[in-house]
Image: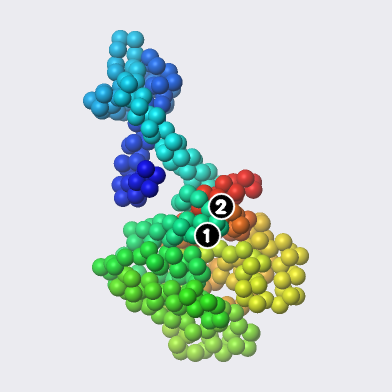
Amino acid sequence: MEDLLKIQHRLVPDLIDKMYRRFNILCTIEKKQPIGRRSLSDVMNVTERVLRTEIEILKQQDLVSVQSTGMKLTDVGEQTLSSLAHYLTLYSSFNHLEEEFFNRYGVKVHIVRGNSDSDESVKAEMGNVTSELLEQALYDKATVSVTGGSTMAKVSESLHPLNKDIMFTPARGGLGENVVFQANTICASMANRTGGSYKVLYVPDQVSESSYETLLKEPAVIEVLDAIRHSDFIIHGIGDALKMAKRRKTSDEIIGQLQHHHAVGEAFGYYFDSKGEVVHRVKTIGMQLEDLVTKTNIFAVAGGASKAEAIKAYLEIAPKNTVLITDEKAAKAIINLE
């Protein structure tokens, strides 16, 4: 049932909204029965005109009976309400969580049930949601820049053939990581799955000052960097600061600095504390955090309770046109961190 609701919500979102609205009407009638339409309108803060239409539909389905004393649920209505209660209450709680995120951080959020720390299928579901949102928004000749990581690989696995000319580029260099999770590999996979094209950036994730200046003069690097900077869509992860530093084989001295400044999160080579203040930055070739300001389609994908602090910190500085795809465990932990 939960899976069916998820599918329906993605395929026909207004269908679930209508179902939830009628579910709320049934819930209110059950609590207040018998109740007149005007009283119901006042309690629910819904116009009588809207209620008249909804009540008529509920009557036709034998869910509500209208008597001189007011409206009541029929036996069928009681059974229907009982059957839907668990699933639509879950839907409601996620809606409230998503609204809470928007009110606090000004970003849209899509929450997947579960904890990706302990259940790989949850990470796969975050990939499904991200790919669906991306496919709905993509247009012909668009360019998509993507970072590396296991979550990005799940996004790639969920994409479908598209009748559009889409270019995929790595958001930054990534040589030295597990090849399966490198941005170059993921871009190639996304292009193959959608029928698009891709560019590669054969440079390390972080480089020395001298190498940085030299690489920026390479024609092949210049060409890819231009495509990255002009990309229309960004898909990126959010990392735990210390885990990312160790993955990059960062020196003990820098790790000590990150610990001293209480770094909790990382994105695009920028390490930040719980308030979103950047405490350290590594030289990376590719997209920079400040480049996001001009982008209108940004998907940040990260989940698991272990990343709650990192995600919350990033939300303090995330562009308002960011869409966060996360899981239930991370979302609840973030709200509780307030």
Q: CA distance from mark 2 to mark 1?
A: 9 Å
Residue type (three-letter) at the residue carrying disc 1: Ala
Q: Name the outermost residue toward the left.
A: 60
In terms of sequence position, does the residue under pointer 2 or pointer 1 come before the other? Answer: 1
Q: State the quadrant of the N terminus.
A: top left
Marks 2 and 1 in Cβ contact (< 8 Å): yes
Residue shown at 31%/50% (left/top)? 11
Q: Splitting the image into 4 quarters, where does residue 71 fall?
A: top left
Percent of width and height locating residue 170: 46, 75
Residue shown at 46%/51% (left/top)? 112
Residue type (three-letter) at the residue carrying disc 2: Ala
Q: Is residue 34 above or below residue 62?
A: above
Q: Is residue 8 above or below residue 217?
A: above
Could you tell whether 292 is left or right of 194 in the image? Answer: right
Mark 1, Cα crowd under 10 Å, few <14 / some 14-19 / many 20+, is many
List the residue tagged with mark 2.
330
Percent of width and height locating residue 19: 34, 36
Residue shown at 57%/66% (left/top)? 267
Numbered tag placed on residue 271 in the rendering = none
SS of the residue under disc 1: loop
SS of the residue under disc 2: helix
Would residue 324 be visible to someone looking at this image?
A: no
Q: Splitting the image into 4 quarters, where does residue 193 fall?
A: bottom left
Numbered tag placed on residue 302 in the rendering = 1
Percent of width and height locating residue 319: 52, 59
Percent of width and height locating residue 300: 49, 60
Residue shown at 75%/70% (left/top)? 256
